Amino acid sequence: MRQFRNLTKLIQLCLVLVGILLSSPSFSEGGTHLDKTFAANGLARISFGIGKNWAADGVTQSDGKIIIVGSLADSSYAHSIALARVNPDGVLDEKFGAGGVIATKVGSNSQATGVGVMPDGRIVVVGWAFIEKGKEGVAVAMYQEDGSLDTHFGDQGLLIFPMEYSTAYVYSLAVQQDGKIMVGGKITIRKEYTDQLLVRSVPDDYVFLARLNSDGAFDPAFGKSGVVVTDVGGGHVRITSLTLQSDGKIIASGTRQKGATSTLVLARYNLNGVLDERFGVDGLANRTMENGRYKPPTVSVLADGRIHLVGGYSVRDEAWLFLSRLRADGTSDSTFGGSGTVVTRTTLWRFSDFIAVTQPDGKIVVSGLSVRPPKPGQSQPPFYFSIGISRFLENGQADISFGGNGIQVVQIGALTDRPTFMTVQKNGRIVVAGHSDNQVGQQIVLIGLVP
């Protein structure tokens, strides 16, 4: 009888999965439409393996192939580092890993947060791993072009940062033209202060940057033995984006939250890891608000050195999307929106998880979570979302020719679809990647759009 019940459950699960695979994404009306030449009618569904699939980041190779990195969680919720590579048409690249995907179990638990492509075509992944007590923390893995680990990097393809950096966590990655690898995040350090004649010790977060040579060794020409730690006022700090300028300078961006004060952190460093005093104030072009909260921004540098900054923030129950353009010195560019910043409030957007990319023509494409309205006559938790994509003109105004009055919404799963990466292909088509939750499982998805 137990076998019969198990068999019945298996059949039911298979039927649900078939329904998921055969279902088509819900797509709002408008001038933008799914790219029918991309994957299966504009949508690629990918599984790293059995378990819950998470997408964290992506990168486009010089040949147009797209690499998505994330994690695969098993039934005990232990994670493995996972990658997939698709051809420009959205079809899995059979020459990569096992049929286009790779799952690498590092220790008992590991997660990927960022991915980059080396000048020689190798693939570098950054994240976190627990091997054993005393060997845990920031992890960097290097893969050959075919998806096999590069045994000449670190220790058989894997580098775990020394224990002195065990309280560091990295969220971002950038590869320099010379093959050196920049990683960025935070490090927690206990700080002593005097309170009513008592000396107290509290943990504070600092900006954490590290630079590695292409073989995994720390670069002694950067900061102190390859590491830079910057105090931006304590609190909770996250550096989620690293952007390299054409002159090699490094822009690190993220957020800081301390009490009721929220700060958008934007710092620029010289090649040696010293803050660039010509940028903002002593290298920092931060923005601060009280009784609100910034969310991690996306930064891109234009050919002329100006900087696009896209992010979100909330004040009480209201959420906003903002786009800013800065001059090369970090000051506001008043030719953008009249003051340098354009702010948009709409109930369609949630204020977090924005991703932005600048097209060659200067238009800015933004992707984020779109609140999913409940079905008629049904209640629904407020955390179900679809993927929303908008485009803005070079001057910051909404591009109403994109989607329906400037926004396009795509619903894939039954619960929540979450974007984590976006790119504009050489043919002008837009690809958004992320993961989609269908109650019975979570899979990686890529959406191809014709703007």
Image (cartoon, rainbow, N blue to C red):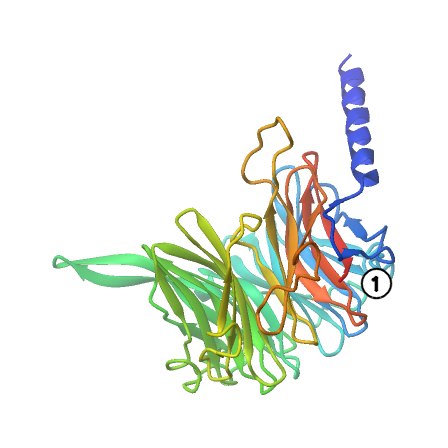
Q: Can residue 343 be seen in this view?
A: yes
Mark 1: amino acid? Asn
Whole-percent x and y of residue 240?
A: 53, 64
- Determine the residue positioned at 66% across, 82% down: 177
**As rendered, which of 50 and 219 lies closer to the eye?**
50
Residue 47 locus on image (x, y percent): 76, 47
- Tell me if 146 is positioned left or right of 433 in this view: right
Provide residue 389's location: percent of width, then percent of height: 66, 56
Side of 11 relative to 51 (left or right): right
Residue sitting at x 47%, y 84%: 329
The residue under label 1 is: 87
Toward which corner of the image does residue 156 lie, by quadrant?
Answer: bottom right
- Say what secondary structure mark 1 lies in: loop
- Of residue 134 and residue 437, the one placed in the foreground of this image is 437
Q: Quick check: 23 left or right of 252? A: right
**x, y percentage for residue 133?**
50, 53
Crowding at mark 1 (Cα within 10 Å: few <14, some 14-19, many 20+): some
Give the vertical position of 293 relative to 233 (above or below). Answer: above
User: Does any portion of residue 126 appear in the rendered image?
Assistant: no
Question: Quarter of the image containing the N terminus?
Answer: top right
